Image: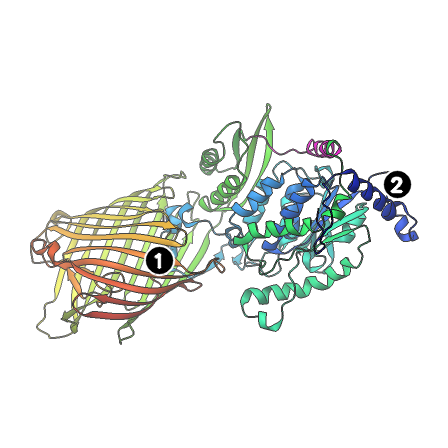
């Protein structure tokens, strides 16, 4: 090897007799030579191999560097007899201690969506359709439990998903950490006293989750009557814990976040890191002072990798490898011969109880209907290929999704064995009392030329009315559009493809305008009142199908304009069929999935309609993504197929991405066609708490005609837009410019635009 900064030093092969001899000599000096009484008592017996402890500090995404250090230790054949970890160090150390390979750890670090774990969001396309249908419009949710009252979380993140992920990764590990392939300790802190708490037995996943529970971000974890939080508060580099385990030599890896200078404290993340840095820096410095000459401190230079840089975990692993190789000479002094190291690792791994395969999945749940649902979904997602180990990400994702789908209060699982077969036993507790949800939303549009509109949204849902999951949903809209709706949704079974009935009432008042060119000459209100009932089927996470009857009326009233302009009123009575397929990952900035909405309405005089006619409405959207770019193809078609001229039924066109540049509702008629392609480019390398920035443009073509006979593709109008957008904490925000054929131009500032 070549020493940094030294030229002409001969290269010595790793494991050569030269290094071996030097190593034995230095070990004799460090371990066997006379030492102060306080140290001599802690040293190993003469002639024996020193016990080596690996101490891993916390540091969020920076903790991937620990994986790189472990890779080098294995390459150099350095035995590890104990592992002690705090926070992300506890995650890496805990998983490795159960028998995981460094290759598995590296794959886990880079492939797992850590931000999704920490935000605890189930991907939108994985939710049951009922749970994702209207969520895009609402920004805040207030929950009131019938038994517990107002539900206020003790942290931004509950830690439930992290616990499930860790549980799947450490399945079968057991409860005695000393019996692991590598004895392990997780370090947390008591939030009441601030004292360090060393965890060496119990539920491994829970102990590691406690070690990562950053105060204010994660909810504290209760273990043995103590409320525990991130161990970095008390001991971010727990060298003394390693000493207590009997370590003769400590290899300490410090990836703690350093304190920033003033010029670096420019955003939320640097300030958050600084706050945590205050808590950790002093206790890390105190621990470093206890290191002995024989100990090794590895401090990877993490550069600009922060605690939240989860997209750069591969870079962090490489930095960890480089930092460990910088200490290669001293680490080599601790190395075993190849046969001895192989025997050492084989002896360790024989104590591993990681499952070879998952042969079955069972659910322990009193509710038979829900048990069948959970069991079926488990088998679908987990018991796929016999003879292959379960993918931990599949296991944790499936169980977290199950919790959402079945509306469970608690969910847990363990490894069980029956007749020589290994399986998953799921313990599920359903919520058995009602919950009140109040959701608030906002939609705002301003063309920066005097035309603006806003809508305040309020939805109240009473859920878990009965054992089948009935719910009563009420929606209110105030602003440019006004409306109220109520629906009682009653499932008929608990399957993923369950049938349901849904009686409903809805009222909506929508303004539209008459134009002479670009001049507004009149304002109308279209008021729709409907009373109906549907029989439907939930298509799992894909969508829903409905068939029902509806009766009501439509009024078109003149608000401003010449009194001689017409006013219209018609009664409606129809049977109606609708199909929604929605697998989009995001309603405003989709990158995958499909959206199809279709409705067929048959008006019949026998059901109370003024005339017989047929109406068709269809919308389709499909994104195609590459890198940071996405192409979105969108189409819209609405048509009245046959009727008299006495009761027109209008569709409206105009506004942002509906022939951008035109005023909302500037074009209307009974026939409408729109086709467009939208290109977006994600500007940020990493999302910031799930938020992102985009730039994009659109090309649009469409028109509306009063009568079916007037429709002509030669009349299609062209339009386009350019925009900047943000997927923000208050919903999607757009700043855009649109231009349409005929000299129509508009600037837009929009909050709350959804496809």
Whether residue 203 sits left or right of residue 115 in the image: it is right
Specify the color scheme.
rainbow
Q: Residue most toward the front? A: 8
| Residue 254: image location, x then y, percent | 69, 55
- Dot 2 falls on a residue whose secondary structure is loop
Residue 487 is a magenta residue: no
Query: Where 113 sits versus 138, above or below?
Result: above
Along the line of sight, which residue is nearer the eye, 79 or 372?
79
Where, by quadrant of the figure, is residue 512 drawn? bottom left
Which residue carries the number 2 mark?
A: 45
Whether residue 639 sits left or right of residue 247 in the image: it is left
Residue 207 visible in the picture = no
| Residue 50: image location, x then y, percent | 82, 42
| Residue 532: image location, x then y, percent | 25, 50
Tell me which segment is drawn in magenta. 340-357
Which residue carries the number 1 mark?
A: 680
Tell me what residue is drawn at x 58 percent, y 69 percent: 264
Query: Where 631 sits versus 398, above or below?
Result: below
Tell me what residue is drawn at x 72 percent, y 32 percent: 347
Viewport quadrant of the C terminus: bottom left
Along the line of sight, which residue is nearer the eye, 254 or 75?
75
Q: Tag 1: Cα neighbours inside 10 Å, few (<14), some, or many (≥20)?
A: many
Alpha carbon of mark 1 to alpha carbon of mark 2: how far?
67 Å
Residue 341 is a magenta residue: yes
Mark 1 or 2, nearer chain start:
2
| Residue 554: image location, x then y, percent | 18, 60
């Amino acid at each position: 090897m070549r020493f940094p900064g030294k030229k002409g030093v001969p290269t010595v092969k790793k494991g050569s007799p030269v290094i071996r001899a030097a190593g034995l000599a230095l070990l004799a000096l460090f371990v066997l030579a006379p030492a102060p009484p306080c140290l001599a008592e802690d040293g190993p017996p003469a002639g024996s191999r020193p016990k080596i402890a690996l101490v891993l500090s916390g540091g969020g995404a920076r903790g991937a560097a620990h994986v790189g250090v472990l890779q080098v230790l294995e390459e150099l054949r350095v035995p590890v007899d104990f592992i002690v970890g705090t926070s992300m160090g506890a995650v890496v150390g805990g998983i490795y201690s159960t028998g995981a390979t460094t290759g598995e750890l590296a794959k886990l670090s880079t492939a797992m969506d850590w931000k999704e774990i920490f935000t605890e969001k189930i991907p939108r396309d994985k939710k049951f359709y009922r749970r994702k249908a209207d969520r895009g419009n609402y920004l805040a949710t207030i929950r009131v439990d019938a038994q517990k009252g107002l539900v206020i979380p003790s942290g931004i993140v509950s830690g439930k998903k992290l616990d499930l992920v860790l549980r799947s990764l450490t399945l079968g590990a057991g409860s005695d950490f000393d019996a692991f392939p590598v004895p392990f300790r997780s370090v947390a802190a008591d939030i009441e006293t601030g004292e360090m708490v060393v965890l060496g037995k119990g539920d491994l996943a829970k102990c590691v989750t406690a070690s990562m529970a950053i105060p204010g971000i994660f909810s504290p974890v209760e273990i043995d009557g103590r409320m525990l939080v991130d161990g970095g508060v008390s001991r971010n580099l727990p060298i003394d814990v390693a000493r207590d385990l009997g370590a003769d030599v400590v290899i300490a890896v410090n990836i703690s976040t350093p304190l920033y200078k003033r010029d670096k404290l420019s955003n939320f993340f640097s300030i958050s890191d600084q706050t945590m840095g205050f808590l950790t820096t002093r206790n890390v410095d105190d621990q470093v002072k206890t290191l002995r000459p024989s100990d090794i401190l590895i401090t990877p230079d993490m550069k600009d990798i922060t605690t939240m840089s989860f997209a750069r975990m591969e870079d962090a692993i490489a930095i960890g490898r480089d930092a460990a190789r910088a200490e290669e000479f001293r680490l080599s002094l601790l190395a075993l011969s190849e046969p001895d190291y192989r025997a050492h690792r084989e002896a360790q791994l024989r104590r591993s109880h990681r499952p070879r395969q998952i042969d079955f999945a069972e659910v322990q749940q009193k509710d038979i209907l829900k048990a069948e649902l959970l069991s079926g979904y488990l088998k679908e997602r987990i018991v796929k290929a016999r003879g292959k180990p379960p993918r931990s990400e599949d296991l944790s994702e499936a169980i977290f999704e199950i919790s959402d789908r079945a509306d469970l209060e608690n969910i847990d699982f363990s490894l069980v064995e029956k007749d020589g077969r290994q399986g998953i036993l799921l313990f599920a507790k359903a919520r058995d009392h009602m919950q009140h949800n109040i959701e608030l939303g906002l939609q705002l549009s301003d063309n920066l030329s005097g035309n603006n509109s806003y809508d305040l949204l309020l939805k109240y849902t009473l859920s878990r009315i009965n054992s089948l999951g009935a719910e009563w949903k009420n929606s209110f809209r105030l602003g440019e559009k006004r409306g109220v709706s109520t629906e009682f949704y009653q499932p008929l079974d608990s399957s993923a493809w369950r049938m349901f009935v849904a009686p409903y009432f809805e009222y909506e008042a929508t303004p539209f305008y008459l134009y002479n060119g670009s001049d507004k000459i009149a304002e109308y209100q279209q008021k729709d009142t409907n009373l109906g009932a549907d029989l439907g089927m939930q298509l799992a996470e894909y969508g829903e199908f409905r068939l029902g009857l509806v009766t009501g009326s439509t009024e078109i009233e003149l608000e401003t304009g010449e009194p001689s302009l017409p006013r219209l009123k018609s009664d409606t009575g129809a049977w109606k069929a609708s199909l929604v397929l929605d697998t989009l990952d995001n309603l405003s900035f989709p990158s995958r999935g499909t959206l199809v909405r279709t409705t067929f309405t048959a008006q019949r005089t026998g059901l109370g309609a003024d005339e017989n006619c047929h109406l068709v409405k269809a919308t389709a959207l499909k994104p195609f993504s590459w890198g940071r770019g996405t192409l979105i193809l969108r189409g819209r078609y609405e048509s009245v197929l046959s009727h008299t001229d006495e009761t027109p039924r209008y569709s409206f066109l105009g506004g942002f991405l509906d022939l951008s540049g035109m005023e909302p509702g500037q074009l209307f008629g009974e026939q409408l066609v729109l086709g467009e392609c939208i290109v977006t480019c994600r500007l940020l390398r990493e999302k910031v708490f799930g938020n992102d920035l985009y730039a994009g443009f659109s090309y649009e073509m469409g028109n509306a005609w009063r009568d079916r006979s007037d429709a002509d593709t030669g009349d299609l109008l062209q339009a386009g837009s350019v925009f900047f957008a943000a997927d923000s904490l208050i919903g999607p925000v757009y700043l855009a410019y649109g231009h349409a054929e005929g000299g129509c131009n508009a600037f837009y500032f929009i909050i709350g635009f959804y496809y």
